[in-house]
Amino acid sequence: MKPHEYLAHWAELAPERECISDGARVFTYGQMNGWARRIADALTDMKACDGQRVGVLARNCPEWVAIYFGAFQVGSVPVPLNYRLNPREWVYLLNDSEATAVLVERQYASALDGLRPDLPDVRDWVVVDPDPDGDVTRGWRPLPGGEAGESPTVDEADCRVGQELWQMYTSGTTGRPKGAVLTGAAVGANVAQIRDVLTFGPGDRMFVALPLFHAGAALPMLTCMAAGGSLRIVPDFDPAACVRILDEERIDCAVLVPAMIQSMLAVPDADDRVYEHLRTIVYGASPIGADTLRRAMEVFTCDFVQFFGQTEASATLTALGPEVHRRALAGEAHLLASCGRPLVDTEVVVVGPDGVPVAAGVVGEITARGPQLMRGYWKLPDATTNALAGGWLHTGDAGRFDEEGFLYLTDRLKDMIVSGGENIYPREIEEVLCRLRGIGEVAVIGVPDERWGESVKAVIVVQAGSDLSEEAVIGWCRGHLAGYKAPRSVEFVEALPRNATGKVLKTVLREAYWHGRDRHIG
């Protein structure tokens, strides 16, 4: 099956089976398929189909699944937006993608409403959850509802169905987000690769606490739909609520990040509950510590699987399976620092600066080849050529293989920071800080953080006579960027270290914080 067919397939085979629940609402496969078809018709009426980009801005809700599959059916290309971003950041993404429609949760509509003059390409404004009393913001149309009823079968004959499935934004060292264009074939291949690792089938329940705008949640959602499973989502992560759901709602598989697992282990009654149905916890975005894993396996009494990848590879390149986690706890703790072995039909090679593969134990750039790779970056041919040189994805991550073929990340060739599973790009923060009065020079780096893996630190040279404070720096960033991008700490220095050409040596800045650690990433 192709991704756009998953929902219709199970709607025909098991229309009364539960498809998705958010705790307040439950939709069967039959209901969700009908809803998706009504959205497909609406997108067609808006002429937002056949390759047109459609921005989607919402917290986790059943509407995400209906919108994704409705768009897939008529060749619309969803552009998922991170609701934690600053509204000005949404403007950039919508303009760059040339989105002609935006589908927005009501609580974010007012923020975008005032930015309409800055969004000339957007023709249609849709409220995902219109007010039950009918008070929809002027100029916004309601999303077709999930109520019972039929919709005409979508005619796919003239649509670019599956050619471009979605456009997810990621960034590089320039700090400018880049739209990774993923095809239906690439995403479908990655779903099949993930299913090869997970034991998950029809009727099983998957709990996803990560936001569905993120590839790390969208791919598990599609994996669940492909298998005919039931998806349980939450709008926001709450450790106590998530612990209760894993215990009381017959969850078979949960998708989390290590920071979430740590928070859930701190819930007072986590030890007292019985997770009778829970078989697997899937995690990614960062490695898990041996102590955290040991405690989690004691409390949740289930298997663990780690996936590693990036948006440019749909989501996943390697997996560290349950048997390796058990080996780690039996005395081979070093394996927990690994991100596993390549997925089926995926080649991963570590290369030196000359592009030639290096021997086991030697650090180089991680490159990968497989059917799950992106088509390229939207409107960025040079960046696409560099990223996919020779048909291989150049990840920008440094790593090494051991003699058993396990891959280990050791550092980043780029300056990206990963904090709590979110990618943060230093230059974007530096550009904001350079506009703050009193700052002469600034460099942003990632430093170790026990909970989040890494946290953002700003290293600043102040202008003579300035009384700039740490509080002022952090407050300025919070006023211009998403909260998670704002520095958590600030250091004031006399000068930044530079090389002969004047480039700031961030490796020198980081070394003081990462000294003595095997990994220079969180």
Image: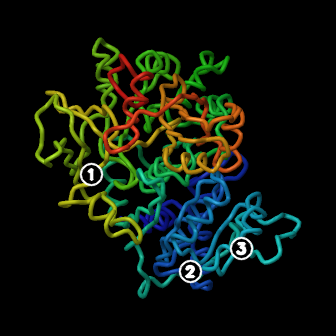
Q: Earlier in the sequence, mark 1 or mark 2?
A: 2
Question: Which quarter of the rendered picture does the N terminus lie within?
Answer: bottom left
Q: Which mark is residue 48?
A: 2
Looking at the picture, which amino acid does disc 3 mark? Arg
Q: Is residue 180 above or below residue 409?
A: below
Rendered location of residue 148, percent (x, y): 69, 69
Q: Could you tell me residue 459's position as x and y percent?
A: 53, 33
- Disc 3: which residue: 116
User: Label 2 sits on what residue type?
Assistant: Ala
Q: Are marks 1 and 3 in contact (CB under 8 Å)?
A: no
Residue 289 horizontal/vertical position (percent): 43, 21
- Mark 1 nearby-residue class (10 Å; few <14, some 14–19, many ≥20): many
Q: Nearer the viewer, residue 179 or 158?
A: 179
> Residue under circle 1?
394
Amino acid carrying label 1: it is His
Mark 2: secondary structure: loop
Residue 94 occupies quadrant:
bottom right
Q: Residue furthest bottom?
A: 158
Is 175 positioned to the left or the right of 116 in the image? left
